[in-house]
Amino acid sequence: IVMTQSPATLSVSPGERVTLSCRASQSVSRSLAWYQQRPGQAPRLLIYTASTRATGVPVRFSGSGSGTEFTLTISSLQSEDFAVYYCLQYNTWPLMCSFGQGTKLEI
Amino acid sequence: DVQLLASGGGLVQPGGSLRLSCAASGFTFSNFAMAWVRQAQGGGLEWVSAIDGRGVRTYYADSAKGRFTISRDNSQNTLYLQIDGLRAEDTAIYYCAKDVPAFEFWGQGTLVTVST
């Protein structure tokens, strides 16, 4: 299953609302997670099962979608949100799972 | 607090071997499946391997079958990844991650560089 994220890079300003897209080449039901990776850091789980926020994740992060189309929305960008965001499908776990190529949020 | 401290990376020649370790703390290690995920320099993420909490069931990405071996020592709260026959394309940061399949928490990673 190929995961395609768009756009590759998004230039935004603090305080803006932003929506990131992740598309699967075939249905993954709701077996989708989102990760944030800041420069020089390990990825951090934000969302799993398409819309459930992980522990400690601010409420400004929300996920939606099912099947092949998914979105991650950040309601009001904070300075610490400028990072790369990856989606992951795990519908075929444990045979395989696959990440998207990432969307970079830049100022 | 959950901590995952990966180690064992380094510079190795093509065809060589490495054993990566991941020391876990802050949770009951044996209750959780664990995984390795790698990231090429400036590149995307790729799941490599996973193992169940008891160390009985192991899983590998197609790219890891045959050369990678995942294991764990629950008495030492440590996860391992043995990599044999290293290739240039194995050059990456290797992260250990807690819980599958949504990789709930990631360690800081250890860099493996395969080069002459």
Image (tube, rainbow, N blue to C red):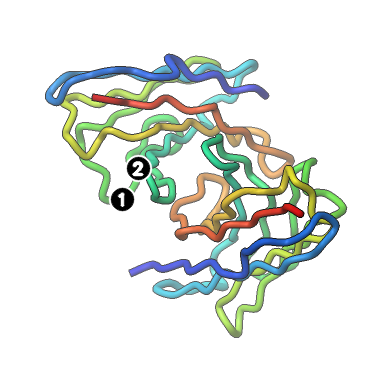
User: Are there few (<14), some (14-19), or many (20+) residues within 10 Å of tag 2?
Assistant: some
Residue annotated with mark 2 = A38
Q: Is residue B58 left or right of residue A105?
A: right
The extreme front residue here reads B116
- In the structure shown, which secondary structural element does the residue marked by tag 2 occupy? loop
The extreme left residue here reads A15
Q: CA distance from mark 2 to mark 1?
A: 18 Å
User: Are there few (<14), some (14-19), or many (20+) residues within 10 Å of tag 1?
Assistant: few
Quadrant of the image containing the C terminus of chain B? bottom right
* Rendered image quadrant of residue A75: top left
Q: Chain of mark 1?
A: A
Q: Is residue B27 above or below residue B87?
A: below
* Rendered image quadrant of residue B31: bottom right
Nearer the camera: disc 2 or disc 1: 2
Amino acid on which the number 1 mark rests in the picture: Thr
Residue annotated with mark 1 = A55
Q: Number of marks in the image?
A: 2
Label located before the other in sequence (2 or 1): 2
Residue at 60% x, 48% y: name it: B38
Mark 2–mark 1 contact, CB under 8 Å? no
Amino acid on which the number 2 mark rests in the picture: Arg
Q: Is residue A19 left or right of residue B9?
A: left
Q: Is residue B22 above or below residue A38?
A: below
* Rendered image quadrant of residue A8: top left
Quadrant of the image containing the N terminus of chain B? bottom left
